[in-house]
Image (cartoon, rainbow, N blue to C red):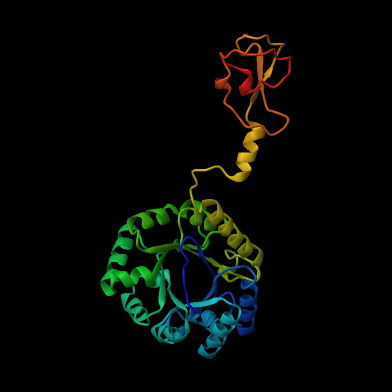
Amino acid sequence: MKFKIKKNSTYVIAEIGNNHEGSFYRAKKMIDLVSKTGANAVKFQTFKTDKFIRNNQKKKFLKKFEISYENFEKLKDYSHKNKLNFISTPLDMESARFLGKICDAIKISSGDNNFLELIEICLGFNKSLIISMGLLNHYETEKTIKNIIKLFPFNKISKKISFLHCVSSYPVNYKNANLQRIAYLKQRWPKLSFGYSDHTIGNEACLAAKMLGADIIEKHFTLDKNFSNFRDHALSADVKDMKNIVSGIKKIEQMTSKYSKLLSHDENNNKKIVRRHPFAAKDLKIGEKIDLNNVNFLRPEKSLVPTNPEFFIGRKVKKNISINSLIKKSDII
């Protein structure tokens, strides 16, 4: 399946990551559930523990989360069967070369966004590349983007590479989410694609990121936020959350897709019953001048073509008008 971000539409990635905790069958179940949420893709992490981390205690923990290359190929096929793009993050060079053969897009983690050798290898696969920008301050972000532009022709980068604002904290405190960075990056680099990888608890940051122009939203996904002590579950979206994120984004797209100079059909209809119309506050005689003492401006009981109150003030009536009667434009001179 081709990875493609549509214009004026936000691409949603459900990051399964390691929330499968090493179970191939659990990973398949998660793909099944993501397919029911309306998300565009699932994302995993692919690694050989020995080539990724040195700490023996962490090695022992992560080793249980490994899924074989063979099973990742099956998960890719299963994702496609469920009409989902298959994306994964390589955490070692060997895994990167493997993913270059099977993925619809490759994601570079925040921990590796300064690992230009890995990025250069992944650029060589002619796949779409998503780069997470956590752990980079303002100046490092500028340097990183410029370094990547040096590695690859700019016209190809604008089509092939997306950068995701990310705060590498688990979970992210709301006051540290720094979502305005999305708007800044889009203004600073208008020809590049920017999105958001969320580590906050809840859905609000994803919807706020959409409002700030995110082309991609990535949110961790879990079967159950209390599934285990593994930290990612608690900050992940479950099925209900992911559905709400996707539906919320679609509603925002409808509400912000264009600026119209015209009123909607519904508002035009409401205008006819909401705008005030002049009604005689007393019996009016021919030649009597209309003012706020002898006319009440009221909402009508039925739909009428609206006319501004100022149009009537100071005008004279050309016929006798009984109290509580509507004063029409044709009744005045």
Left or right relative to 33: residue 42: left
Q: Name the quadrant of the C terminus.
A: top right
Identified at 57% across, 68% down, the residue is: 39
Image height check: is 112 above or below 168? below
Q: Is residue 139 visible?
A: yes
Q: Position of residue 245 (x, y in %)?
A: 59, 60
Along the viewing direction, whichever of 190 and 230 lies nearer the viewer? 190
Percent across and percent down for residue 234 are 60, 65
Residue occupying image coordinates x 52% and y 80%: 62
- Tell me if I can see residue 114 in this picture: no
Position of 165 compared to 147: left or right? right
Q: Position of residue 133 (x, y in %)?
A: 40, 65
Image spot of residue 37 (x, y percent): 63, 68
Q: Tell me which residue sits at (34%, 81%) in the image.
A: 124
Q: Nearer the viewer, residue 326 or 227?
A: 326
User: Is 106 on the left-hand or right-hand side of 157?
Assistant: right
Up-down relation of residue 288 to residue 49 (above or below): above
Of 212 and 272, nearer the camera is 272
Q: Which residue in the rendered view is the most extreme toward the bottom? A: 70
Marker count (numbered): 0
State which quadrant residue 326 falls in: top right
Instruction: Identify the residue at image location x=72%, y=32%.
Output: 302
Picture quadrant of residue 151: bottom left
Q: Is residue 196 above or below residue 296?
A: below
